[in-house]
Structure formats: C-alpha cells, structure tokens
Amino acid sequence: MSAETQNLTDGFHLVIDALKLNDIKTIYHVPGIPVTDLGRFAQAEGMRVISFRHEQHAGYAASIAGYLTQKPGVCLTVSAPGFLNGLTALAHATTNCFPMILISGSSEREIVDLQQGDYEEMDQLAVAKSVCKAAFRVLHAQDIGIAVARAIRAACSGRPGGVYLDLPAKLLGQTMEATAGLKSLVKVIDPAPAYIPSPVAITRALDLLRSAKKPLIILGKGAAYAQADADIRKLVETSGIPYLPMSMAKGLLPDTHPQSASAARSTVLKEADVVMLIGARLNWLLSHGKGKTWGAPGTQKFIHIDIDPKEMDSNIEIAAPVVGDIASAVSALLKGMGPNWQKAPVEWTSVVREKAAANIEKMAPRLQNNNVPMDFHGALGALKRIVAERPDVILVNEGANTLDFARSIIDIYEPRKRLDVGTWGIMGIGMGYCVAAAVETGKPVLAVEGDSAFGFSGMEIETICRYKLPVCIVVFNNGGIYRGTDKNPTGGADVAPTVFVKDARYDKMMEAFGGVGVYATSPDELSRAVKEAIASGKPTLVNAVIDENAGTESGRIGSLNPQSVVGKK
Ligand code: ADP
Ligand code: TZD
Ligand code: MG
C-alpha cells in the first residue's frame, strides 16, 4: 500500500465494514462484475462468503438465514440477470415475512438512465420496488453506512421482509478518508423494536377466550420466527387449548404433545368457536377463514395476534385484534391469565384428543410397510423414526405428494426445525435452504425432495459438497410431477409434460462432486443410508425409488386446479 492510499478506504470496504459492524457474518453470493472483489474482500475481512451456482438459490439461502436468525440474510449478486435471478428469492422473503437484503451491483447510472446499452444494463431499483419492503440506491461512499443501516431496519422491523440495496459499480471504487469512513458507519440500535399490544386488546382477547367452549390456537411461522418458544409453550399449556401448527410452526411444541390437534385438523377447524391465530395469516393455507373447511358463518370468533395491523380483517371479521409483536403479546396474555386460569373445557379437549389418537392409530400400520417399490407411507415412516431419534435434525421439504405426506407424517420436536415451500408453495427452495440451515446452525440437515422439486436447485449439490456441509438429500423419485404414469394422449414420441426420464439416478449426480450417492429401493435401505449420512455428516444423496403410481394430482391441493369441460387427459 502506498503512503497516499494508506489512510483511505473505499466503497468495497465500507460495505463490508457496515455489515460486520451490524453483526452480519455471512454473504450468500454468485461472483461477477462488478462485485467479484466485494466477495473476495469480504472473505479476506473474515466474513463467510458462500458462493452458489445460481443466484436464486443464494437468495433462498439468505431468506431462510433471516428466518432462522432474526437478522437479515444477505445475498450478493451481479447486475441485471444476476439481480433478476436473486429477485425471485427477494419476493419470496417478502411474501413469507423473512428479513433479507438483496445487494446487487449495477451498471453506470448515466448510461442506464439514458438507456445507452451498458453491460448488463437495467434500472434494477425500479424493478425491485414492487416485490420488497424497501429499495435503496447508494451513489456516494459516505452514504453506505446509513444505507446499510436503513436496509437492516427495514428488513427486521415490524413485519419482516425483503429489502433491495443497489450498488452502482462506480460506488464500490470510490474512496474516502479512512477515519471519516469509519465514522460514517451506523450500528443499528434495536433493529426490531418491541411492539407492545394495548392492554385493552389483551383484555378483549382474554374475555373472548374465557367465554369459549371449544377454543383453538393456530400457530404460524410468525410464531416460530418470534423465538418466544418458552412463553408460547406456556400459553398453550396453561390454557389447555388444543393447537394446530402451520407447517413451519411444527415443533414449537413437539408434534407428539397431547394438545396437538394436527391429526384432528378438519374437526377442530370446523367445530372451534373461538380461534386464536398467533403469527399465521388467514390466507389460502387456512381457506381464508371461511367456506367448507370452517364452521357455519357467524359461529366462530377470531383472536388474531400479528405485528401488522393491516392483517386484521384481511379475510373475515376479527373480533379481538391483538396488534403487537408475538413475544410481547404472548407474555401480556400470560400475565393476564394468571396462575388460576380455567383450562379449556374437557368435553372439548377430550373429543379432540380422541379424534387425533384414532387417526394416528389408523395411520400407524401403513408407516411400517416395507413395500418395494416404496410408497410414500413406507418411505416416510422410515424417515419419521429417524427424526424421532434425532430431533436436532433440520428438515427441508418440497414437492407435491412428497411435501404433503411428509408434513403430516414426520413429527417435528423442536422449534424452527421444519423449513418448506412456505406461503407460495414454491418449488426450488430446497438446496438453498439446506446450505443456509447447515451454515447458520451447524446442525445436520435432512432434505426430503420430490424429484421435480429437487430439479429446480439440484446443481447446488456441488455447493453442498464444496463446503462439506452435513446435508442428506432424499429424492423421492416417482419419475415425475405428482406421478410418473401420465401418457401423451396423441401417442406421439414426446412423453407427457409431467413425466421425467425413467429410473433416473440422482445419486450419481452426488458422486460426481465427491459426495455419497445411495440407490435405495426399500424403507430399510433408505433408513440405513440416512442414518449413516447423519452420523457421518458427509454430503449424501439417497435416490429413493417410489412407486410411480403412488401420488395424486397436486398432492393435497388438487382442488385448486381449474377444470376444463372439453380437455382430454
Ligand atoms: P403461516 O404460513 O405459518 O400460516 P404466515 O406467513 O401466513 O404464517 O404468517 C406469519 C405472520 O406472522 C405474518 O402475518 C407476520 O406479520 C407475522 N409476524 C412475523 N413476525 C412477527 C412477530 N415477531 N410478531 C408478530 N407477528 C409477526
Ligand atoms: N414452479 C414453481 C417455482 N413452483 C411450483 N409450485 C410449481 C412450479 C408447480 N409445482 C407444484 O406446485 S408441485 C411441483 C410443481 C412443478 C412438483 C411436484 O412434483 P415432485 O413431487 O416430484 O416434486 P411428487 O412427490 O411427485 O408429487
Ligand atoms: Mg415426483
């Protein structure tokens, strides 16, 4: 370093220093102009820089890192196409209420704005705005500190979500005096301030709860995100109310908990008279709180705890809105309930418990089958028993049948141990989630993937092997989307659009990168392979051969498909 540059810093280093000052330790990334050196310098400065094969997966990794840690996951991409690849994940983070920051390099402003055709030219800020909570562009090195601070605050405060930060190439090379640079950085104090619900709202909610004959609690992934695990459990147990976890809220209380109503879902949704939603929206996943899934209109009243006031009455009337952060709200409810709270009526809780127990008993023998080729129940029964022995494993899950069956069959025992397709029911989160789950927690990861779902992010198994992550991927290979048996009705040479290559060997892909590949045709073989993978921590892919007839159209959401009166299948 020459004497003149000794006391200088630049845009690259200010971005890194600003992130580090705010305790952000990892960047999920794909290198290229103009951010290659940003990734290199970040690594040199002690950050963990995880380099992916495609930005979408780096983005999904960042989004779920945000969910797991309550700190924004950071994804760093190149301009236009790299940015667009990352944008799907940014939209996903916003939709799922995960804090994330997408940082993209961009081309020369003067050329972009005059549309003169720069390398990877695009007005990225304008494009990003519609899919995130906030979008900022930085033009001067001295503003980097404040921009990163704003991005963190926007991502974490209130309802969490995605934020876009646009860094033009020229900014990164800009210099400023090092001490002034250091002073320009901002450490965000209290990035997610508590949002205390009003005492009136708490009293109203408790009065309604007290009047209930058939109360129900629904826990959503907002409740899991809030990390108020002990108080949430205490609330459920003190109240004695049956609870239903949404898929990513499974494990907040162990799925084997006597108050779990998962196996009596349709009964409780239909019959409950007061429903308390904690960090769960009444969106399509809960049939918007109305229709045949629910009781007759007017027979059910809702308490809704959410940090976003706009969520109240979004689909139906909310009798007791509790606007606040979940930790504060649950603690206020507990305080209001006191030690002598009357537990939920046994006439109700015993009905729910018996219904759930009967359904679980009915299912049990199917989960023990050792059929070859495997069906979903035999294969998932084997995995269920493994997770019961290793509750610390993080389960990543996507697919259609593979998703729906795994969600109901595999019990989860600890909070934030089930990561899945989320609010959009999106395919492609798989390998990005695996990487971030392993990197952020150091825990073993088990991915249960439909063969179609796996294909969306399959190339990232190289990333998993490269970083030697303790990830075991099980591909449920039924030869296609939903099933492998569709035919081309014309009899032409092309196979049906839902069908893949027969007997594909996904396990060999893993071997290509030095990982362990296993071909499993029975639940016993599958079980052995997964146990070994978890014990060794070696990147492993098990190709689990599933009966190509076993699945159904769209898994459990086939009813959402529009129907044709003239089309032939
Ligand atoms: P699920 O898909 O599990 O039903 P949703 O994603 O629909 O869950 O709902 C999550 C909800 O949790 C969102 O409405 C979001 O505003 C809310 N939320 C997220 N974090 C918090 C928090 N700390 N406190 C209160 N509400 C939160
Ligand atoms: N693209 C994206 C990004 N998300 C989607 N949800 C889809 C397409 C549509 N889709 C589903 O909803 S499930 C699915 C697709 C393509 C794949 C289902 O096949 P699978 O699972 O092999 O993963 P099963 O076990 O065969 O049902
Ligand atoms: Mg399939």
Image: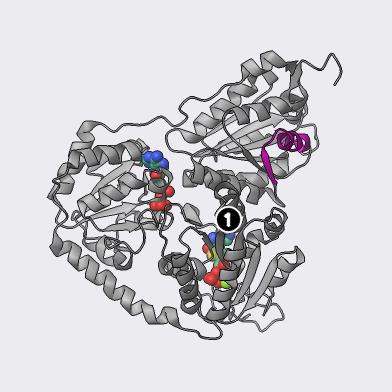
Residue in front for this viewpoint, 127 or 556: 556
Q: Is residue 565 above or below residue 150?
A: below
Q: In this figure, which colouring scheme has been used for the structure?
A: one colour
Q: Is residue 551 magenta?
A: no
Residue in front for this viewpoint, 549 or 72: 72
Q: Secondary structure at mark 1?
A: loop
The magenta span reads: 35-50
Please give left or right for residue 368 compared with residue 201 in the image.
right
Disc 1 residue type (three-letter):
Ile
- Image quadrant of ligand 2 equals bottom right
Q: Is residue 259 above or below residue 415?
A: below
Q: Is residue 499 above or below residue 329?
A: below
Coordinates of residue 450 in the picture (x, y in percent)? 57, 68
Quadrant for the N terminus, please: top right
Coordinates of residue 55 in the picture (x, y in percent)? 68, 48
Residue in front for this viewpoint, 302 or 412: 412
Instruction: Name the residue at the front extreme.
Output: 535
Identity of the residue drawn at 34% across and 52% down: 219
Where on the picture, by quarter, is residue 527? bottom right
What count of labels does the image hold? 1
Coordinates of residue 73 in the picture (x, y in percent)? 57, 41
Coordinates of residue 348 in the picture (x, y in percent)? 17, 62
Where on the picture, by quarter, is residue 115? top right
Residue in front for this viewpoint, 301 or 175: 175
Q: Residues within 10 Å of mark 1 (few under 14, many from 20)?
A: many
Please give left or right for residue 471 compared with residue 260 in the image.
right
Residue, disc 1: 429
Identity of the residue drawn at 26% across and 48% down: 235
Instruction: Name the residue at the bottom extreme.
Output: 372
Quadrant for the C terminus, please: bottom right
